Image (cartoon, rainbow, N blue to C red):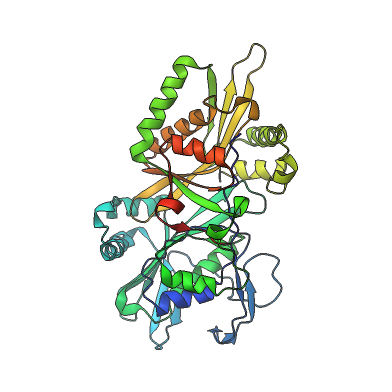
Amino acid sequence: MYFLFLFCIISINILILCQAIGNQSLLYNKFSLSGSSFLLNGIKNNKISNKKLDYFGINKNFTKGKLFSVNPLNKNNFVINNGSDDKQIKIRLAKSEDAKALFSLIKELAEFHKMSRTIRITAEQIEKDLNSGFMHSLIAFGDKGEVAAYALYYLYGSSTKGIGQIMHLEDIYIRPQFRRKGIGFLLLEELAKIAYSENLPFIEWQVLRSNFGAIKFYKKLSGLIDETDGKGKNKCNLWRLSAQSFDYVLQKEAKQKESGEELIKEIYLDGGEISENNSFYLAEQWNNLIASQKNGEEEENKEFLLDNHSLAKLLNSGLLGVIVVKKKEKENNKIVGMAFFHRKGYSTWQGRFLILDNIFVVDSEKEKGIGTSIMSELVNIAQKMEANKIQWEINEENKLVDYFFKSLNAENLTENEGWLIYR
């Protein structure tokens, strides 16, 4: 059985984080973690709209305090705030004509980390992706109109119960001369407005183990769970299949076809291409597969599963795509594996990529090439969209899944590069 619940819950004090961005040299907080909500708890000395804030929760059930009047930006409007030195900072949604300015900031960020050679994206691609809606960014300007900072993010869906659609903050970069002015906080405040207006439950992100400044702030947060210190299902790892391994996966499946049983694959792309009828059918089949488990985990997994109606709505809205693998039988073709994915991932330096949300193979068919068949189809989709990686999260307890992904030359980024996950 390959079954991943690919979301680790996080409750992060965004306001403290923003101060960390503003007051320390945290040039690159490449965040990407998920959670049921994020809270700003117990903040006493920070003024927002000239009012002190004691509590704020960005979920539809919060009852105390407000961080903002909900009036999200559009591409043509500025929000004007005062920095700590009373100079005006202007923030708005990035437009296609901002592509060159954004690209210059991205290059600065890469040069600082001595990773300029890893930049694959171009100003032309940024312009195209801003127009198509694959890329979203806030851009900040100083009082003289000079570009000061950006916050790159993307939106995507999750099949995990209680999550739905998520805002993923890819990174924030503030030019050196504009640091310590509260711009990081102002950017996150505007992101929170957008998330709230879209009924998104939280903002997610990731942090590197080497980012000592950010980690220092995280460790001070009450209620914070460090997923890298946990055990079993409380320890999540970030994984990646890079483009260099795509051909290996395809070749491995080709060899399996020569000796294995005939498999039938059905592909339903995200982006509004799944009909209402197919959405309900796929949701029902997914939950039936989970219920078919024989290893006693069904009840334990129920708390993470969307009901048929909620999952169907998510699929029909275009937030997730589906891969179905069937085994050919005499009377009826039997579903033996399924996966959810989306094509909304966006890397600052390399552009669009594919995210695996969930994957499942029935117990009776494990170690028979079903998982490889699913992953090879994900590779095909990634190649068609010119993505250079597929990314996902899994809990450490599932050793079989861990072994399976390593057999495909996938990398555990938490182990190899130090990507940490917090709850």
From the image, which quarter does the C terminus lie in?
bottom right
Return the x and y of residue 260 as percentages of the image width and height. Answer: 51, 17
Could you tell me how many numbered marks the image carries?
0
Residue 181: percent from left, percent from top: 40, 82
Outermost residue to the top: 330
Q: Is residue 79 visible?
A: no
Residue 12 figure quarter: bottom right
State the image coordinates of residue 343 (x, y, percent, origin top left). 47, 44
Residue drawn at (40%, 28%) of the image: 250
- Determine whether, in the image, residue 181 is placed left or right of residue 420: left
Q: Nearer the viewer, residue 257 or 402?
A: 402
**In the image, is residue 151 above or below residue 321?**
below
Q: Give me the residue at 59% from left, 54% from top.
A: 231
Q: Quadrant of residue 207?
A: bottom left
Against 221, residue 109 (above or below) is above
Query: What's the residue at 58%, 43% (across, down)?
Result: 398
Q: Nearer the viewer, residue 191 or 251?
A: 251
